[in-house]
Image (cartoon, rainbow, N blue to C red):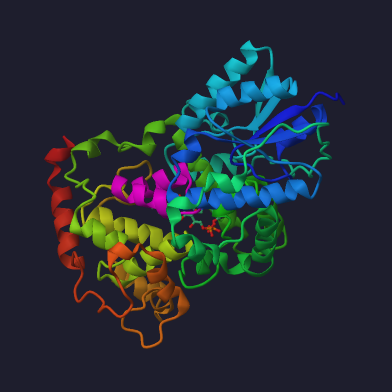
Amino acid sequence: MSETPVILWLRRDLRLADHPALTAAAKAGPVIPVFIRDHSVDSLGAAARWRLGEGLRAFAETLEARGLRLILRRGNARDVLRELVDETGAREVHWSRLYDPEAIERDTEVKSALKDAGITAESHTGHLLFEPWTVETKDGGFYKVYSPFWRAVKDRHIDEPLPTPEVTAPVTWPDSDVLEDWRLGEAMKRGAAILAKHCKPGAEAATARLGAFMAHKVDAYKTDRDLPAEDATSRMSEYLTYGEISPRQCWAAGARAMEDGKKGAEHYLKELVWREFAYHLVYHTPQIMTDNWRPEWDAFPWRDDERLAEVKAWKQGRTGVPFVDAAMREMYVTGYMHNRARMIVASYLTKHCMIHWRVGQRWFDDCLIDWDPASNALGWQWTAGSGPDAAPYFRVFNPETQAEKFDPRHHYLKRWIAEGQARPPETATDYFAAIPRRWGLSPEDAYPGRPVVGLKEGREAALEAYAHREWAE
Ligand code: FAD
């Protein structure tokens, strides 16, 4: 092995195990792990940026325990990497590929600038199980429907996860910014302390959680995954977002559970593949992140105005529709929202309230600690009806019947809505400690007497607009 240091440029891959880029870098020389605060970091929503800071802290501690460091730098990635190459004498830079359009543009530019300077620049797999261009239909196109995508990949051979490699430290370390000086949690204000109660960052926590899920919960996953009051899902989303666990580690654990005869395991693998499908679509049709995937929806009379009373009520968890409000508060307090609840709040906003899905997407961007560019865009367009393989617009979720079916004893509602409870739980009162004071809300307020948009009227108006198909011509 050469003594010349190798730069490992970290982005959404804050782990040591099953890390092909790290494994390659460690083989080539002493490793300098670097994280760059560039536009992709500064454009993150408040909760996602806070969570990134927590992940960086945990990862830096893991590195330090091995005699390594996490070098933090700020600026344009191409310039920072070129500077670091000059400072350290490194001749190679490795990173794990990302697939959203902004990352692809940046990484392409970085790669060519480094190559022009005579530096080896290598991107690796790791963020996905299946590179988006390797899954093709019979005609050589990409998949637009999930089920055939699943059938195309489910029997593929997937290598076992890589072990943590031996990593050597360089003789001298370049300077680093101090993480605290970056103040990544600044925009969260007082909500940060509340979020922190619900968040265990880092690869170690991810692995422990995955192990516990596979040991105790995956068996019942297929049915219980729909119950928002139960802790019945893997909660891997935030760890996958920051790469504190790899999809291959999740797949391997699920495949082992399947071999062990755990009933819900195959369904778990199927859900994991929804994430792959989201990236497949983002890669092949990047406009899914910003525009109606089906352009005929451009003429639909959705309202895209943040100032509307319905938008305010939705964001503040004060629509007067208990399931919707509980879910919006769950997200505000924990940075996470149960999958069924995500579909219900998205349906209420885009259908009953006829608000553009982009308004909801932006709010999720700001509030989710598991924010993922591909899954969020697909989730919104799927629910709104404008996306590929979408729920048809005329299928409108009814939050009341959904609550009866999936939260019959109102545990979820009581956990999150304080108003009207003599002794509300801490989760419900924490909401009021987390929200901005200027919202002027208190747990002693009366709960809204009637919904901001009634379920019957909202449904009828949405279906009426949908039936009025001139917009689709
Ligand atoms: P599990 O049920 O344990 O599933 C395992 C893994 O499979 C998840 O961690 C996730 O990586 C993947 N997965 C499961 N369901 C989906 C799905 N529908 N789409 C894509 N991947 C899935 N997921 C995000 O990670 N980030 C987002 O920003 C995001 N925004 C969403 C917005 C809307 C409107 C909707 C309807 C869904 C969104 N999802 C998003 C998908 C899904 O709700 C979450 O992935 C899931 O709730 C995470 O919980 P879990 O890790 O316990 O999931």
Depth check: 417 or 214 in front? 417
Residue 10 is inside the magenta segment: no
Q: Quadrant of the C terminus?
A: top left
Where residue 347 appears, as percent x and y from the top left, is 30, 57
Where residue 51 appears, as percent x and y from the top left, is 54, 52
The picture quadrant where one finds residue 37 is: top right
Residue 326 to residue 339: above or below: below
Query: In the rendered image, is residue 140 in sight?
Result: no
Q: Is residue 138 left or right of residue 255?
A: left
Q: Quadrant of the N terminus?
A: top right
At 83% from the left and 36% from the top, the residue drawn is 168
Where residue 130 appears, as percent x and y from the top left, is 59, 37
Residue 365 is inside the magenta segment: yes
Q: How many marks?
A: 0
Residues drawn in magenta: 358-382
At 54% from the left and 63% from the top, the residue drawn is 196
